[in-house]
């Protein structure tokens, strides 16, 4: 299941691709995984991104507040690491999406990004994230 925040016709976007709930187990990563894609002009990235249910709930609530026209910040971040996505919006129509991504491969890669979109683009993403979060059951591994 994919969720994209993007203005119609814009090249810049952030996407949560193949969003899925993982089995909850002490030896596994947190219960949500996505392929986070960012296209920020000349910079682009696609990384695996993991986060917990309470963090997703707070992120969705923040997006819903931003979409309603009230100022808010919504942060999606891994539990113990630095990678994050921050969506900030005030009473104006412009929303800022910033973040920090990293990849620990042979040569560490880091990307700080910043893109903008209209507040109207946030509402559909918030609704789709809420629908996905509410529809996928929590799987428990004994």
Image (cartoon, helix red, strand yellow):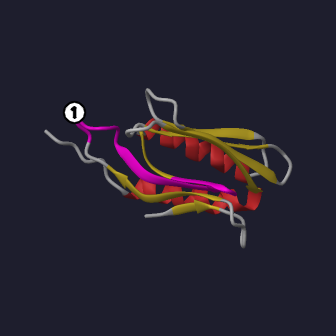
**Is 36 one of the magenta-colored residues?**
yes
In the depicted structure, whether residue 67 falls above or below residue 121: above
Q: Is residue 52 visible?
A: yes
**Is 89 one of the magenta-colored residues?**
no
- Residue 93, x across and y down, in percent: 83, 54
- Quadrant including the C terminus: top left
- Residue 111, x across and y down, in percent: 59, 41
Q: Residue furthest front?
A: 107
- Residue 50, x across and y down, in percent: 41, 42
Q: Residue at x 66, y 59 (%)?
A: 123
Q: Secondary structure at mark 1?
A: loop
Give whichever of 123, 75 is nearer the camera.
75
> Which residue is labeled 1 in the image?
27
Q: Residue furthest left?
A: 142
Give whichever of 76, 70 is nearer the camera.
76
Q: From which residue to which does the magenta span run? A: 24-45
- Residue 14, x across and y down, in percent: 60, 56
């Amino acid at each position: 299941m994919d969720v994209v925040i993007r203005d119609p016709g814009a090249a810049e976007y952030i996407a949560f691709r193949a969003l899925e709930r993982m089995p909850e187990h002490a030896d596994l990563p947190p219960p949500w995984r996505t392929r986070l894609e960012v296209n920020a002009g000349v910079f682009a990235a696609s990384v695996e991104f993991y986060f917990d249910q309470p963090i997703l709930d707070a992120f969705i609530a923040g997006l819903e507040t931003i979409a309603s026209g009230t100022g808010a910040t919504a942060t999606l971040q891994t539990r113990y690491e630095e990678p994050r996505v921050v969506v900030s919006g005030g009473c104006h129509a412009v929303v800022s999406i910033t973040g920090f991504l990293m990849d620990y491969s042979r040569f560490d890669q880091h990307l700080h990004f910043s893109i903008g979109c209209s507040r109207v683009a946030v509402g559909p993403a918030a609704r789709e994230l809420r629908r996905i979060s509410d529809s996928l059951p929590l799987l428990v591994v004994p």
